[in-house]
Amino acid sequence: MLRDAVKGDCAELAELINIAGEGLPCYFWQQTAGPGEDPWQIGQARAARDTGGFSYRNSVIAEVDGKIAGALIGYAVADEPEPIDTDDTPPMFVPLAELENLAAGTWYINTVAAFQEFRGLGVGSTLMRRGEEIAAELGLRGTSLIVADANRGARRLYDRLGYEEVASRPMVKEGWQNDGENWVLMIR
C-alpha cells in the first residue's frame, strides 16, 4: 500500500534517506550537529520541514502489513538549471548538484529505499513506478536519480526499470566512507 507521508513518519524517513544515501546523510548531520545534539534529530527535523527537497511533503510511504516498509522522496527539477552557490554548498554535495542540474525538467528521485526486512518484496519497484506516475501527472519529461557507481543492487534495479546512465561526477568524500568513485546520473 502506498500513501503520502505525514510528519509522524519523520523518524523512518530519516532512516530511509540514510539507507539510500549509503550513510552520507548521517555523516552530514554529524558534521553539522552542535555539542550534545543528536544527528538523527537533525535528520528528523529536516524531514519535518514543510519546504525543501527532503521533506515529508515530497515523500510517499510504502507499507506492508501496516508497517512502514520503504519510502520515495522526490521533486521536480526546474527547466532551467539553478546556479550552485559553492560558498554555501558543502564540497561533497557540489557533484550531486551538478548532476541534478543536468536532469532539468524531470522528477528527481532523491530517495528510494526499503528497510532490510522488506527487501525482495517489490517495494522498491512499486515506489519507482509511483515516481514515474508523479512525473507523468506533472507533465515532466521523465524521472531521474543519482546513484553511487559501486551500488550494484540499486543499479540492477534501475537498469531493469529502463534507466540509462547520462553523466557522472567524481565523489568528494571528505571523511565519509564509501566504496564508490563516482556519482552516476540516470534518467528514464
Image (cartoon, grey):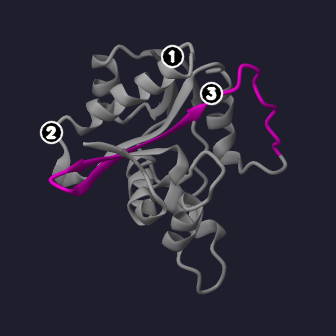
- Circle 2: element type: loop
Badge 1: how crowded within 10 Å, few (<14), some, or many (20+)? many
Residue at position x 35%, y 45% in the image:
3
Q: CA distance from mark 3 to mark 2?
A: 30 Å
Badge 3: how crowded within 10 Å, few (<14), some, or many (20+)? many
Could you tell me residue 165's position as x and y percent? Answer: 47, 16
- Asked if residue 79 lies in the magenta stretch, the reply is yes
Q: Which residues are magenta?
A: 61-86
Could you tell me residue 186's position as x and y percent? Answer: 48, 21
Q: Amino acid at mark 2?
A: Leu
Question: Which residue position holds label 2?
Answer: 121
Of the image marks 2 and 1, the number of the one nearer the N terminus: 2
Q: Nearer the viewer, residue 141 or 82?
A: 141
- Circle 3: element type: helix
Question: Which residue position holds label 1?
Answer: 142
Q: Nearer the viewer, residue 62 or 87?
A: 62
Question: Which residue position holds label 3?
Answer: 99
Of the image marks 1 and 3, the number of the one nearer the N terminus: 3
Q: CA distance from mark 2 to mark 1?
A: 25 Å
On the image, which quarter does residue 49 sit in? Answer: bottom right
For residue 15, say whether it is visible.
Answer: yes
Check the picture and name the quadrant holding the C terminus: top left
Q: How many marks?
A: 3
Could you tell me residue 142's position as x and y percent? Answer: 51, 16
Q: Amino acid at mark 1?
A: Gly
Of the image marks 3 and 2, the number of the one nearer the N terminus: 3
Q: CA distance from mark 1 to mark 3?
A: 15 Å
Please state if 129 lies on the left or on the right of 168 as rendered.
left
Badge 2: how crowded within 10 Å, few (<14), some, or many (20+)? few
